Amino acid sequence: MPVTKQAIKKVRQDKHKAVYNLRRKNAYKKAVKDYLKNPTEVGLKLVFKTVDKASKTNVIHKNKAARIKSRLSKKLGMKSKPTLIKKKVVKKIAQKKHKVKVKKSL
């Protein structure tokens, strides 16, 4: 049993955090199970959102979140790298178009 005031307060805080963390953990697990039953892009976005929130609040480790997202993306057959390459190419083209030429005046 805690004796000091700060220890008593810590026990109260831990009870609250345990409930909150369990809620986050159950939410991401439910989202993953639902996605595995019916893999869709909307479901994948929901899984990404819940896993990222769980990772951000330290309910799960960030590497575990990345591993879950990677494996579930493979289930859907999404190829993320080509879209990233396209965005880079589009960005370079946009930068070339918007370059301003400065005239030298004497």
Image (cartoon, rainbow, N blue to C red):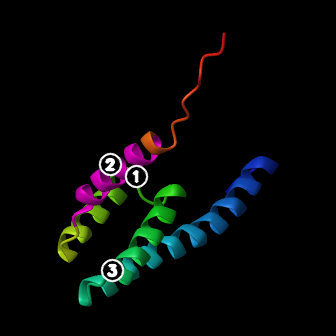
- Which of the two residues, 99 or 20, is positioned nearer the viewer here? 99
Q: Which residue is mark 2?
A: 89
Q: Residue at x 28, y 51 (%)?
A: 85
Q: Main secondary structure of the magenta part?
A: helix
Disc 3 packing (10 Å; few <14; some 14–19; many ≥20)? few
Judge whether residue 4 can be spotted in this image: no
Q: Amino acid at mark 2?
A: Val
Confirm or deny contact between disc 1 and disc 2 (CB under 8 A): no
Q: Residue furthest right?
A: 5
Q: Measure how far apart labels 1 and 2 are at the Cα level.
A: 29 Å
Q: Where 29 falls versus 90 (above or below)?
A: below
Q: Residue at x 38, y 46 (%)?
A: 93
Q: Amino acid at mark 3?
A: Glu
Image x and y of residue 76, in percent: 21, 76
Q: Which mark is residue 41?
A: 3
Q: Which residues are magenta?
A: 79-95
Q: In this rendering, which labeled residue sits more in front, label 1 or label 2?
A: 2
Q: Which residue is mark 1?
A: 62
> Which element is circle 3 on?
helix
- Which of the two residues, 95 or 13, is positioned nearer the viewer here? 95
Tell me: 94 left or right of 103: left
Q: Which mark is residue 13?
A: none
Confirm or deny contact between disc 3 and disc 2 (CB under 8 A): no
Between discs 1 and 2, the one toward the N terminus: 1
Point out the image quarter for the C terminus: top right
Q: Residue at x 25, y 83 (%)?
A: 36
> Which element is circle 1 on?
helix
Q: Residue at x 71, y 63 (%)?
A: 12
Q: Amino acid at mark 1?
A: Lys
- Which of the two residues, 14 or 102, is positioned nearer the viewer here? 102
Q: Where 20 falls versus 89 (above or below)?
A: below
